[in-house]
Image (cartoon, rainbow, N blue to C red):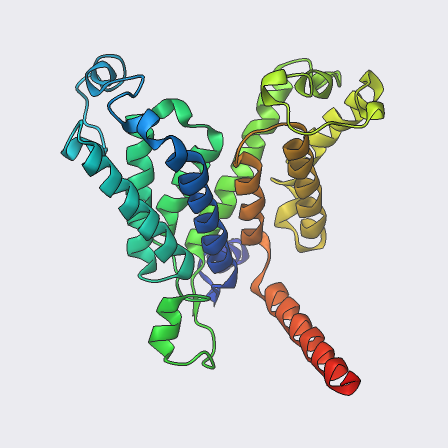
Amino acid sequence: MKSIWETWNRFWFKPIPSTSIALFRILLAAIILVLELVQLLPDFDFYYGKCAPVSNRLMEMIMWQKKPILDLFLLNPDNLLWYQIVFALTVIASISLLVGYRTRLSACLTWLGLVSMHQQFPWIDNGGDGFIRITLFWLMFSNAGDSLSVDRFLEAKTALLPEKSAPPWIQRVLQVFVSFTYLYAVLSKLHGSMWTNGSAFYYCIRLKDFYHFPLPGFVEGLSASGIFSYFALIAETGMFTLVWFPPTRNLALLLGACLHLGIDWCMNLGLFETVFLASYVLFIPPSDWHYLAQRLKQFYCYCQRKTISAS
């Protein structure tokens, strides 16, 4: 029992460098900026302006029903200028989160802005947006600004000081959340028959509303459908089993990455696949990132020497 308790405490609370969660912060903020500037901004007036399909009064009747709602837009309802100010502040907070300036405050403000946009017009929301809001909420309490950030640079006054280490419990919470998402996905698939009989992929690639890029002809048959359907189940199972063991972690991440890249090629699901791929950096230990940084530095020095010798 003592060894189990020590393993539990070591998993949640043994200090580690913040490289992985800092990289996740950067990727998540970049995805949020794409969501805001590419998907929401061009149609902002349609979603939130006076000509929006659903008014505040109708939202109160069919959705809010006079319940407490966390929505900054409602501080000054039906005022497009106020809506634009909230949106602009959310974008600024997202940029601040990307560079790691006042990281926890930036995460909090970005989360408030995204929650407000969802509450105001929930019909543009999907599973990827929910995933973003949940992970962003936990980042408010994390040490994601302890590395690769303006906060760290200002604190150290130089980039040469050693990296800070801290208990990784927030990173562990996010890892468990990602793994349980895959567990839920597998259990949901096993309730039906299409995934177990191998026909699910055949029907998924024929959903015209989600059509993305063309597929080679040989993958559109029922035989290929069985292979890809079972591959999806295996890859998702690996992301809540094999990913927790160092010898099999990279294999699980590779299978999961292939799954999401394949789905993104077949189906246009917005940023859904990109968000899950970004979460994979949480499972990569800081030692691997440091090793990669050293190798890249060696390669850069090698290229410099070749350039100098050639000149």
Residue 168, x across and y down, in percent: 45, 58
- Going 48% across and 40% down the picture, which residue do you hit? 177
Q: Nearer the viewer, residue 140 or 309?
A: 309
Q: Looking at the image, can residue 72 be seen?
A: no
- Going 39% across and 45% down the picture, which residue do you hit? 136
Residue 139 falls left or right of residue 310: left
Quarter of the image where one finds residue 201: top right
Question: Is residue 278 placed above or below 196 in the rendered structure?
Answer: below
The image shows a total of numbered marks equal to 0
* Residue that extends furthest to the front in the rendered view of this protein: 311
Question: Is residue 188 placed above or below 173 in the rendered structure?
Answer: above
Residue 105, x across and y down, in percent: 28, 55
- Going 25% across and 39% down the picture, which residue do you hit? 84
* Residue that extends furthest to the left in the rendered view of this protein: 76
Q: Looking at the image, can residue 287 be seen?
A: yes
Residue 112, x across and y down, in percent: 28, 41
Q: Nearer the viewer, residue 216 or 310?
A: 310
Q: Quadrant of the C terminus?
A: bottom right
Residue 184 falls left or right of residue 161: right
